[in-house]
Amino acid sequence: MEWVFYGIAFLVSVLVTGSAVYALYWSSKKGQLRDLEQGALSIFDDKEPVGQPTDFFPGKRPSKPAR
């Protein structure tokens, strides 16, 4: 009866691995992996330049940026 457990575990692992491989294939085909640096910088705007955080918790002063 334990062969049912191993069979289901194997099937689940094959499905998870297959979906991960397909996700990598899809992202590569759609160009999601071409320019990772630009994607990382796209979250910044003119009010928050790169390397100078402006967000802080309420009631706490922002720390000075490390140089």
Image: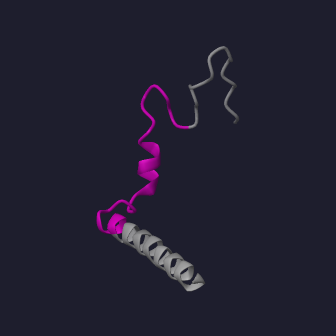
Residue 33 lies in the magenta-colored region: yes
Between 27 and 6, the residue placed more toward the observer is: 6
Q: Nearer the viewer, residue 3 or 28?
A: 3
| Residue farthest to the top, as pictured | 59
Locate the C terminus and report the quarter of the image it occupies. top right
| Residue at x-position 52% and y-position 81% | 4
Examine the rendered structure and indicate whether residue 32 appears above or below residue 67.
below
In terms of secondary structure, what is the magenta stretch mainly? loop
Q: Residue at x 56, y 25 (%)?
A: 54
Looking at the image, the residue that sits furthest to the front is 1
Q: Residue at x 45, y 36 (%)?
A: 44
Q: Position of residue 15 (x, y in %)?
A: 43, 74
**Residue 47 locus on image (x, y percent):** 46, 25
Image coordinates of residue 38 in percent, x first then y, are 42, 50
Q: Which residues are magenta?
A: 26-50
Q: Please tell me whether residue 32 belongs to the stretch shown in magenta.
A: yes
Which residue ends up furthest to the left in the rendered image? 30
Residue in view at x 32 percent, y 62 percent: 31
Q: Relative to the observer, which residue lies in front, 64 or 26?
A: 26
Q: Is residue 42 above or below residue 8?
A: above
| Image vertical order of residue 17 relative to residue 33, above or below | below
Task: Find residue 52 and report its horizontal and vertical position in percent.
Answer: 58, 31
Toward the viewer: 65 or 57? 57
Q: Quadrant of residue 57?
A: top right
